[in-house]
Image (cartoon, helix red, strand yellow):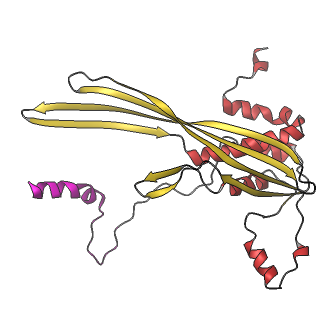
Amino acid sequence: MQAILKLLSLTPLLLTGCIATSHENVDLPVGPPVQNVSTPYDRLITCIATKAKLGGVWAVGEIVDATGKFSGEYAGTGKFVTQGAGDMMQTTLIKAKAESVVNRRDPRPVISEIQLGIRDAKQFTLMDYYITGSVNTLDFIPGAAAEVTIAGIGPRYRQNRAIVGLDLHLTDARTSEVLAAVNVSKQIFADEAGFGIGRFFGSTLVDLDISGQNREPLQLSLRSMLQFGFYEMLSQLNPDLRKDCQQIVDAVEGVEDQSIKS
């Protein structure tokens, strides 16, 4: 019996070809190709680049993870929310064709050169505007589930959601005046559907379970939130931007164009 159990435990490895001798490399699985990250709001940023004139020198400060939430998974512990929100926003600025974007994300290289005396700090371009903020909301909403079993056979369904929220501020670097501020939130959706069979064959219980899960990607959704928040801040300063770009937002959100009906 022990030999059978050991063989069963090795079956997945045998099927995937992951067993090799100690001096051989195993064949690595090949997954999907590398691609550019895209979100439903990429067209919105393109519209901003076309219709809005982002003059001056722009920069991004800290957009911190202030949720305080950690995740414990099989591969170790870590934070639920990415620590790279500021880099996402800087990429958004560049894609929006800001007149000039200076990198304030990591000042250590230039500070090192200043300390070594090989660069003058007065050479650096001064900022006109900078964006800061925080991801400060991550609430898990209790989900709902349903299951029907007749004679050990039946389907099940489970749904869960989480709310992610962030605040962004656009600041005038010359006066430190906050020119625009937004708070954005989004529900992250996840569900699971399955079918189970549990039957006795003689005195032996055979339990078969088939299931599938779907979960909206959290970090990709965060990038969408940053793009939308950037648009909202610019719209506060330039209301005419909504006339040119709001239809893109409505299309993403599934808002029907009322002008078609009229």
Residue at 16% x, 58% y is: 6
Q: Identify the residue at image location x=65%, y=57%.
A: 84
In this rendering, position of residue 123 left or right of residue 197: right
Q: What stretch is highlighted in magenta?
A: 1-26
Residue 42 in view: no
The N terminus - image quarter: bottom left
- Is residue 65 left or right of 262 when viewed as pictured? left
Q: Name the outermost residue toward the right.
A: 175
Left or right: 134, with 1 as reference point = right
Check residue 18 for magenta coloring: yes
Q: As rendered, which of 168 and 156 lies closer to the eye?
A: 168
Q: In which quarter of the image is residue 113?
A: bottom right
In which image quadrant can residue 185 be found?
top right
Residue at the farthest front position = 68
Residue in the foreground of this view, choosing between 181 and 224: 181
Horizontal and vertical percent for residue 110?
78, 75
Res. 187 image quadrant: top right
Point out residue 69 in the picture as x, y percentages from the top left corner.
55, 49
Q: In this view, does 112 lie above or below 200?
A: below
Q: Magenta includes 121?
A: no
Quadrant containing the C terminus in the rendered view: top right
Measured as percent of width and height from the top left, residue 76 is found at: 44, 58
Residue 204 is left or right of residue 209, and the answer is: left
The answer, for residue 122, to whether it is visible in the render is: yes
List the single residue furthest toward the bottom: 117
Q: Where is residue 56 in the image (x, y as percent from the top left)?
A: 91, 56
Q: Residue at x 13, y 31 (%)?
A: 200
- Number of numbered discs present? 0
Judge whether 28 appears above or below 167 on screen. Answer: below
Residue positioned most to the top: 262
In the foreground, 57 or 144: 144
